[in-house]
Image (tube, coloured by chain):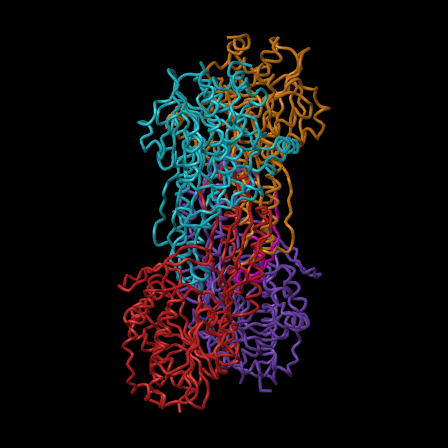
Chain colours: A purple, B orange, C cyan, D red
Amino acid sequence: MNDIAELLNSATTDLTWQRDFYRDLHTHPELSMQEERTASRIQAKLADFDCEVVSGIGGHGIIAIFRNGEGPTAVMRADFDALPVEETTGVEFASVAEGVTPQGVRTKLMHACGHDMHTTALLGCCALLDDLRDQWSGTFIALFQPSEENGAGALAMVNDGLKHLMPVPDVVLGQHIGPGAAGTVMSKPGPALTAADTIRIQIFGRSSHGSMPHLSVDPTFVAAMIVVRLQAIVGREIPPSEFAVITVGTLTSGNSNNTIPATANLVLNCRTYNDAVKHHLYAAVERVVRAECQASGCPQEPTFEYTDHAPLTDNSPEVFAAVRSNFDAVFGVDSIDGTPWTASEDFSQVPRAFGAPYLYWMVGATPRAQWDAAVAAGRVTEDIPSNHMSNFLPDFEPTVQASNLAAATAVLTYLKK
Amino acid sequence: MNDIAELLNSATTDLTWQRDFYRDLHTHPELSMQEERTASRIQAKLADFDCEVVSGIGGHGIIAIFRNGEGPTAVMRADFDALPVEETTGVEFASVAEGVTPQGVRTKLMHACGHDMHTTALLGCCALLDDLRDQWSGTFIALFQPSEENGAGALAMVNDGLKHLMPVPDVVLGQHIGPGAAGTVMSKPGPALTAADTIRIQIFGRSSHGSMPHLSVDPTFVAAMIVVRLQAIVGREIPPSEFAVITVGTLTSGNSNNTIPATANLVLNCRTYNDAVKHHLYAAVERVVRAECQASGCPQEPTFEYTDHAPLTDNSPEVFAAVRSNFDAVFGVDSIDGTPWTASEDFSQVPRAFGAPYLYWMVGATPRAQWDAAVAAGRVTEDIPSNHMSNFLPDFEPTVQASNLAAATAVLTYLKK
Amino acid sequence: MNDIAELLNSATTDLTWQRDFYRDLHTHPELSMQEERTASRIQAKLADFDCEVVSGIGGHGIIAIFRNGEGPTAVMRADFDALPVEETTGVEFASVAEGVTPQGVRTKLMHACGHDMHTTALLGCCALLDDLRDQWSGTFIALFQPSEENGAGALAMVNDGLKHLMPVPDVVLGQHIGPGAAGTVMSKPGPALTAADTIRIQIFGRSSHGSMPHLSVDPTFVAAMIVVRLQAIVGREIPPSEFAVITVGTLTSGNSNNTIPATANLVLNCRTYNDAVKHHLYAAVERVVRAECQASGCPQEPTFEYTDHAPLTDNSPEVFAAVRSNFDAVFGVDSIDGTPWTASEDFSQVPRAFGAPYLYWMVGATPRAQWDAAVAAGRVTEDIPSNHMSNFLPDFEPTVQASNLAAATAVLTYLKK
Amino acid sequence: MNDIAELLNSATTDLTWQRDFYRDLHTHPELSMQEERTASRIQAKLADFDCEVVSGIGGHGIIAIFRNGEGPTAVMRADFDALPVEETTGVEFASVAEGVTPQGVRTKLMHACGHDMHTTALLGCCALLDDLRDQWSGTFIALFQPSEENGAGALAMVNDGLKHLMPVPDVVLGQHIGPGAAGTVMSKPGPALTAADTIRIQIFGRSSHGSMPHLSVDPTFVAAMIVVRLQAIVGREIPPSEFAVITVGTLTSGNSNNTIPATANLVLNCRTYNDAVKHHLYAAVERVVRAECQASGCPQEPTFEYTDHAPLTDNSPEVFAAVRSNFDAVFGVDSIDGTPWTASEDFSQVPRAFGAPYLYWMVGATPRAQWDAAVAAGRVTEDIPSNHMSNFLPDFEPTVQASNLAAATAVLTYLKK
């Protein structure tokens, strides 16, 4: 056991408030850009600590600056928005909240990605570091980022003057919970999360009464052909050894039973680990969409809007080396190697803005017995609820504990006296 | 010129109010089941006439009973709901109204099917018959039906006790405007409008994060395959000499950019002129949907809900013979033969409920010069806005006049002294 | 009973040779352009009659001219090629013949369209007219046409100088067997058979090893997308009240297990009753094919070759009126109204070349009990083998008799003294 | 420079016959199982060397045993069949040969995979070793394998008693030419080539005349839907980080223009690097095919036949280590690391049969200037002809030299005194 492990091991900080705090967030999820209530809860909790709080950055973004003498500056980040998913976990504190998407669609909401846990754990880390002030020196900044799900929040904070609100960090740290035995901490150097872009596509057909298809150009049919054909880009155009995902996250066309609509809308999410693949992929998507519109004789060219850009998350080998040895000391056999995740994050926008090195790791959230059984049966994919699923729910106690400690460990790697 | 032609020719009823009335309805369209304002406008106008009004039948349905001594009972019907279409006519009285569909989707609204004209003309017919009371005897009933677009209004009126609110009719009459030289009246015996059903289908996949398609069963892809494959039912399974339409009026799947949703929803509208074809068609739709779900390994069977049933509109040869000779007398060369329309109507639900014979005809609404040019160029399909299109707009003067007269002519065929 | 009925009723011509002749043809089917044996059998039989024979017209075409004094000229035509279908009738005289298509594919052969019956019956008609020479005057021409299945034979005979080999006919007659109670004769004025064209399409992709799809442009995938999308032309672009068929008769792509081929080939057969529909259909086919090639990034434009053109078969109302009254006299209740057939024929090329009026009728070939049972059960489509099916087999006795008599009746309508 | 490098460097063996020998094979390609001429040319050349030849093993397979005293046994293998590809290289010795596939299809043939080069180089290796007999001891076996392209030849040799015809080898070696700077030798330990299977699928529809699709179940449409949907297995069901290829190598349906056929045939080639992925893939293929047949109402279940199995080629780390150090000595900077190839081979069937370790490496065949330009332009994929392409042609001189030397180097690694 090393210094940091010993220190955290002997810490007596009261974290019993975390369960209620977490459940409160979980019961009241809010969509990206609309996280007013969540932000106010975070601020309320921060009032317990000796820190400077700046709020309302890039929407509902918040930083809490813990100044503690000379030394480096370490940032730990958590995100706090939720998803338009209808919860099916069946727990007593399950969400029944509703919201309206930017497209005007009313939807049920859920913390199906675990951001409630990230936020709870970052506040736990604040509590630990606030308690252990005599053990470290420098500046610790807890960064609470809104709007991660639409990939806009980190950049919004940067663009709202983040650089003028805090010192240049020496390191930026972040974590995410997901499938894995609850309490394990999974880290790796290099590429950890994919680059991603959202492509919003509008198809222009010609409307007519549903009984007169020959007077229409049916955009629903065009959209369907596109959805079908996009998968062949993955299967036929991308080298089979390369990573590429094209997911149609939203398809909407028409809103009545008997009118062929004039337009259809597609929202695509594309992910890659490699720039050449990305460029081919986007060119192929546009080629396919344009050609399918031509095949049906659409009267107008389709439009493409690229949004929600997420850069590649590419962990610094130096930060990894430094933090990992402490993870190993603190978590023992539960500090394991991560594999590249297929997901994306806008996490790296903040370190990129400052030119700072960064590390992003995962924390397992699956009840350990369930995880072990699924691994033994070779049924992880089938049996383990994953992020964004309506039945995703972290095993609270081991997950929050590991998340608290991992965050504090990584920060102390840079700030420990 | 016969008696009725002479009578209507010499009528001096003031109908100048019709333009304002029509524009008011046009500017304020309301969705099916929500026609509160429109119904109140109709009632306000009916107050000008000597009739008994019963309102609130099957929602916002209204009947106005003009009793005038002994004789047969003739019903003339107009519908008055509007569509979730965004108007592009550019006229000064164009609609900017919005509404919320039963599925909770906010949408622009438009009288894109001409029901505002039908209603205006039925009130015009009321004015004429009220003025000409000494020329006819019996009972004239003006029936204002809501909720035609969802196929539910006529049956809703029947099921709300219509039989107890009015005498058994000897004939039920109805009309619809559409493409054709404005002022022409198009009638035919036998099948005039298709049978139709709406099939609401829900596909059950498995949700996951958009970057992990292998953890999902992607219902958007399944829905797209279904949309694509349904057209092959028409092209491969239905005898090519038979009429069959399968239109996907609505397709919605997902509401975010980076989550594969758990379900997708399809709303189909199917039309036929023939029972055997209909039964094959519906069986084939269910077969295709179920098999596509199996092909993707959906964890749950799809569901099917049949709604908005519209029966075949099958004109009585006797009513046709009687009314047509008067149309010929009143409209001369502008009384022409109709061809079967591809659309459907719930119009026949009322005469079916009473066992009464019926006639349903069309009135041309296209500016005559535009129509003639399109016919000459062989470009009717391409150039003439049709019902449900966002630029459909009747040529007011000739259309309302022909509609007023056609309604009065048909009623007087039965009630003229 | 009229004159012709009486005459044919009392004819004593020996037709017992027909069964063996028919079975011989049935056992030895030959592909279009390759009907050498069949032509020699026809010529051998014609040698029994008093007629001039010209053979080798447009390939294996034959005319037999029966001159019999002054009077009009009537042509009766039969076709005699077979199909690349493997017979499954199970009869003792079933075909086991093989042939090689023009594309070089070895295939089993079958008279699955009944041309063996047409030929047998035209020879029966020759026998009858040869026997009854004293009852008629004028010129009777029996025209035996090869290569009907590829739509080329009639035009090949015309282009090989048919006009110089025979007098201008006053009428041209033809018949075809098919589903229907054996012995019934089905006739109608006006459109009887569809216009048809074959469109041969070649798709150009880029070949590669099967394990390296990213180096290829996969023409098999492009061809599949085209096959799928073509049916949407029928379902979405053609007015639902119009007749339109697009059948992919042949699709071939690749010839190994592990090479993505460079090209794919499609052979389409398109049928319509209406020129405007036809033009839209062909334009849409080309639009869809070109766009699907673009969607996959094909390095070269697809090519289109239009072949096997069959014109609309549009029966002369005058010929129909004249012949039908004699059919009614000869066949009684078995002379019935025909409905438009979905199939096509190049039959009308000969009368078109001469500017002569024509009539084409159908003869039922299904065992009567089987037909009646299927009609009663509403299972004609499911239960009755149709032309081109591998189990299509006419009920010999009533079919050949009706075919003999119908041909003779129609010819005598013009030539009877 | 080490011993082997020095030895081979100073060898004076006459290899000038190789150019003519190679061109002769190239001009006369033969399909798998039909390599009679090629086998006779190999045997003729082997007659020049001091070895025992056994021919006709598993078809046209040949082994040449060079016994040379005590010591280990090393096998070097080359394959010698060709492909149904039409050559477009334009060289004077280009193939114009034709053949007939097992399915009866006539096709042009080409050595588009470089087996002519493999064979020429193995004979070159024989010449070198025969000349250098005093430098090595043990047994060298040159194994000439037929029918690699259909994946059957190696197993056919094993099943024809190979074990009784030769001693148990201590090592089995093989090489393949492909894209890469001519003369480079690319090697790696572990997985080098994919596991592959061919799945032959027959779809059963119902035939009918092309104009009567409603009487048919169109197997061409079913096959097209399957081709389209298979790519979604790759894009939606396989983890995006895993390697999976589904290629439809052959699709044939129908052989006329106007008959909907009764059956369609698909030949799939599937490749993976991982057993779990393979099992999921094959189950998904069967699920998709069965469901698409159900969607169209096919009267009979589809059939699946698994053939042309190629096991994973998984290089022995020990053999790699031993041979690679000699490659480095002989080729210097032209001995480079290989990356896993997407292709498959039945090469490993022979060492598997004997339980012997093995190594399989690649030799670059692209003219060096062309390769360097393509790499610099980032256009390797677009510009460099790859195996199985119709314009694939090795740069003879550097390719044959490197292939000769690589084979001899690897053998001498085990047999050098």
Q: Nearer the viewer, residue C307 or A341?
A: C307
Farthest residue, direction right: B164
Relative to C332, is A359 above or below?
A: below
Q: Residue at x 38, y 34 (%)?
A: C61
Residue D275: horizontal and vertical position, in percent? 56, 69
Regarding residue A164, the answer to whether it shows in the image is no
Q: Is residue B202 left or right of residue B16?
A: right
Q: Nearer the viewer, residue C160 or B153?
A: C160
Residue A206, quarter of picture: top left
User: Does B48 appear in magenta?
Assistant: no
User: Does B213 appear in magenta?
Assistant: yes
Residue D304: horizontal and vertical position, in percent? 56, 58
Relative to B346, is D282 above or below?
A: below
Specify the quadrant that holds the N terminus of chain A: bottom right
Residue D416: horizontal and vertical position, in percent? 40, 89
Relative to B233, is B142 above or below?
A: above
Relative to D240, is A127 above or below?
A: below
Regarding residue D399, the answer to whether it shows in the image is yes
Residue A92: horizontal and vertical position, in percent? 71, 61
In the image, which residues are magenta?
B200-219
Q: Nearer the viewer, residue B123 or B250?
A: B250
Q: Nearer the viewer, residue C312 or B176?
A: C312
